[in-house]
Structures are given as structure tokens and as C-alpha cells.
Image (spheres, rainbow, N blue to C red):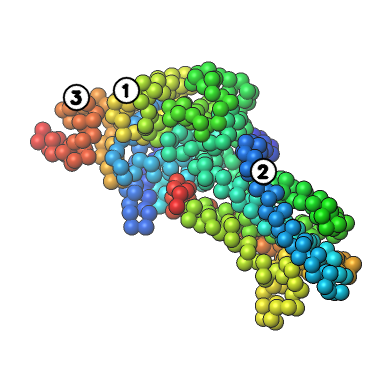
Amino acid sequence: MSAHSTSVMVLAPHRVGAMVVRYLYLLRSSWTRLLELIYWPAVQLFVWGFLQFYIAQNSGFFARASGVFIAAVLMWDILFRGQLGFSVSFLEEMWSRNLSNLMISPLRPLEFVCALMIMSLIRLAIGMVPVTFLAIAFFGFNFYSLGLALAAFFMNLILTSWAVGIVVSGVLLRNGMGAESLAWTLMFVLMPLTCVYYPVTVLPDWLQVLAWMLPPTYVFEGMRALVMNQVFRPDLMIEAFALNAVYFGAGVVAFLQLLKSARRAGSLLQTGE
Amino acid sequence: MPPLAESAIAVDQLVKIYKATRAVDGISFALEQGSITGLLGGNGAGKTTTLAMILGLVMPTAGTVKVLGAEMPRQRYQVLHKMNFESPYIDMPHRLTVRQNLRVFGRLYAVDDLKERIAALAAELDLAEFLDRPVGKLSAGQKTRVALAKALINAPEVLLLDEPTASLDPDTADWVRARLERFRKTRGATVLLASHNMAEVERLCERVIIMKRGRIEDDDTPQRLLVRYGRETLEEVFLDVARGRGQVREAAQ
């Protein structure tokens, strides 16, 4: 592939790499950014971990379900922090008023998206890996003991987080910084609906229909089946993956359409409020 | 005016409408390869929107823009690696050092021998002493030099500049102009420069396009404009056009 291929659909590793290096330079330059990546997952872990301790001491059911809250909180963080890692890297370009420089460079939109996905993984690893060791040290819960199922859970959660991150970035491109709060809040709509901390059967029937339209619901149900009943449900993972493929594809199409619309509206020139 | 097909930049009947505002209203011009042209106009004249359409950042409502034969923005990836842009209204990441910024942009533009290119630009634009300093800690003049280095990182064939010396002191502004002039001559690049600074345009440009309310009011060499308007400076010509006195004077003659 030539360094200057003319197709929009090209993915050139040197340009994706350039963007990843750009974000790594930024992370390296700011210890507060690094600290923030670990801070909130750790706080969440301690709140839910100690709550689980307390409930387990007073309930036979929850004593059997040891680890289910901690697994849920860690997996929710994969979903939420995965999207946030994607969106914050994108926001860095808007905060630094650098977006126009990128949009007039040979960087393709899909290369930009790839770089943001890689950064989402790197930021997630920096934030989550130390917290999983804290879970072992403080609560005796080994997240990695979920084995291969963890890979299926992770893949499905990260795909959903990227799909949401891609759409949020498109909305930011089109509407500017006025839409910034979406990056921080949109995922929380999914929290009650995807049944992070309770089974889907808790929801009223009509809301269960909506819950089953969301891939993370399958992942959290699958996690509970594994942690509480030691049963891995591949059917749930396959259904989640099929839904994710649809949402991810729709997210990419929406991003490209919003970018086109931003070019029409002139909003790539003004990326302020 | 060169034929549209052979021009470095060819703008034909270009229109941009934002909701109820006609920001650019049916303008046409063609720029010869290797030429340097000034785009003059008051606030809201449509200069920045015109530049943005040439860069492929904004989609025209009607008309066409071609850069080195590629229609913008549809065929932009044929030419974006041969173009670049500098504006004081676009920043570079503040926390990254000058060298890190230039490395990132150099890789985006697939610059060969990037290390040597950065060293050459640092020498040419006097950046060496602050290459490893974060961009956010530089003075306005230093930032402009860094932005210029970014705009020249790929030795562009087409260079667009939006008020490149805005907010600079006269000495630094003069220094920047000299570097731009040198780059244009040695590279043979086509340069389009939007500016409010008439002295700058008079010094650098061999052709001036004056815009007002989205239209081209005049388009000629600085010398011919001065003669035609019976003025001594481009600033006086600009004021005549801005205040609608241009046509009156010409009609009277």
C-alpha cells in the first residue's frame, strides 16, 4: 500500500501509529491524567467490595454469590471506561483546538477511529489491571479466574463501548463542545437497563424487551450464570456479539454521516461551543 | 487568469450558504502554480470559508473547487498530503513538546527522513532552543513559528495561510514574512494568503483578490490596483472597496 493511497477506506498503520503516539505523549506528560484512570475504578471497587462483604455476612444467598458484585463492578468499568477512553482521546483534540489540523491532514476517519480504539484499550489497561489486583488483595476475588469466558465478556463489552464512543464523537464533530456532556453521561442510561447488578427478571416485562436489545445485558447475565452457578452460556455471548456487530456497524455509518454533515454545516471550522 | 484546468487552485462559481447567510456568493478564480496571492476582505467577507472549502473542511453549496486537479472535498485524499495550512485560530496540542508535535504531523504526512526534516525546519525557523519545550509554554511569536514549521513539514506544493502574522509584533511578523517568501521561491509552492494586513499583502503577493460580503470585488496585481483606484497604498484601496467608494471613483473617471 502506498503512503499516499487516495481511497477513503484505506487504513495506513503509520497514520494510526502517529495518532496513538500523539496520545501516549499526552498521557506521559500528565501524571494527573494517569492517576485519574485508576482512581475511579478503585473507588468503585472498594464501595461495592465492602458492601458485598457486609451483605454476604447476613445472607446465605449472597454468601453463595461471592464475587458477583465485584465482577459486576469491574465489568461495568470495562464498558464505561472503554467508552470514556475513546471519547476523552477524541475530546483532547477539541480541547486543544487541533481537530482542524487533523481534518486537513491525510488522516482518514477510519484511521482516526482505529487510533481511538487502541487508546481506549491502553487507557483501560492502565486503569483496570491494577484494580483487578486490588480485588485479589482486598476481597480475594480473582477476576482472571473467569478464564476464557472473561475474553468473551471483555470483547462484547468493549465492542459496545466503542460503538457508543464512535457515535458520541460523531455528535461532537457535528455539534461542537456543547455536546461534551454526552461523553460523560450517555453510558449511564445503559446502567439500569443492562442489569449490571441484578438479573433481568427484576425488570417489568415491557422493560425486559428493551434490556434484551442491549448487548451488555447478555454479558452481565452470562457473568452471573458463571459466578453463581458455574455455568458458561455461549448462547448469550453469541447473541451479544451479533447485536454488537449491528451496533458497531451502525456507529461507524453514523460517524461518517455526522462527519459529512459537519462538513456541510461548517462545524469543523468552529469546534467550540 | 490561467485556464482552470492547469491551475494549482481552481475555484468556479463557488457558493456557500449557512442557513440564511450567503457566506460565499458565486466566486471564481484560478491560481497559477508557484504564484502567491493575497485574499483580502473585512470580517465576514468570506475569506476563511473560501480557504476552508479549498482545504476540504467545508462542503460547497454550489460550484467547484479543484486543487492540483482534485475536486474538493470529494477527491481530497489525492492531494491532502501535498497541501498544508497555518492559522493562528488553530492550535497544536499544548502539552506536547514542539518536537513531539512535529513528529506526529510528520508521520501523518508520511515525511521521509523525518528526523532530518525536523532538524532542517528547526534551523530554518529558529526553533532549536525550544524544540523540547511544551507548545503551551511558548510565546505567541514562538507558537507562530511552530505552526509554520507544522505547515511546512511536508514541503507542501499548495500552502494556505489565514492571517499568519496576526497578533505578532512587527519585527516577528517581518521575520515570518521573509521565511514564507523564501519557502515559496525555493519550493515553487502555490501560496494563498488571507490577511487583514495590507502591508503584508503588498510585500508578499503578486496578485490580490478583494472580497466583500462573499463576492469578489476586485482581482488584480497590487500595482494595477493602486493605479486604478488612484491610491498610494493597498490599505487605501481596501478602504475604498470596503466603503463602496471603488465603483464611484471608477465611474467618475
Residue at point 43%, 42% (across, down): B52
Give residue B106's quadrant in the image.
top right
Mark 1 crowdedness (10 Å alpha carbons): few <14, some 14-19, many ≥20: few
Q: Amino acid at mark 1?
A: Arg
* On screen, residue B183 above or below B3: above
Please provide percent x and percent y for residue B176: 41, 23
**Chain of the residue under the numbered disc 1 shown in the image:** B
Q: Specify whether A5 is left or right of B66.
A: right
Q: Determine the secondary structure under disc 3.
A: loop
Please provide percent x and percent y for residue A31: 64, 40
Q: Earlier in the sequence, mark 1 or mark 3?
A: 1
* On screen, residue A48 above or below B151: below
Residue beneath disc 1: B203
Q: Determine the secondary structure under disc 1.
A: helix
Mark 2 crowdedness (10 Å alpha carbons): few <14, some 14-19, many ≥20: some
**Chain of the residue under the numbered disc 2 shown in the image:** A
> From mark 1 to mark 3, how far is it between C-alphas?
14 Å
Q: Determine the secondary structure under disc 2.
A: helix
Residue beneath disc 2: A34
Q: Nearer the viewer, mark 2 or mark 3?
A: 2
Q: Nearer the viewer, residue A255 or A148?
A: A148
Residue beneath disc 3: B232
* On screen, residue A152 above or below A6: below
Residue A178 visible to the viewer: yes
Q: Amino acid at mark 2?
A: Leu
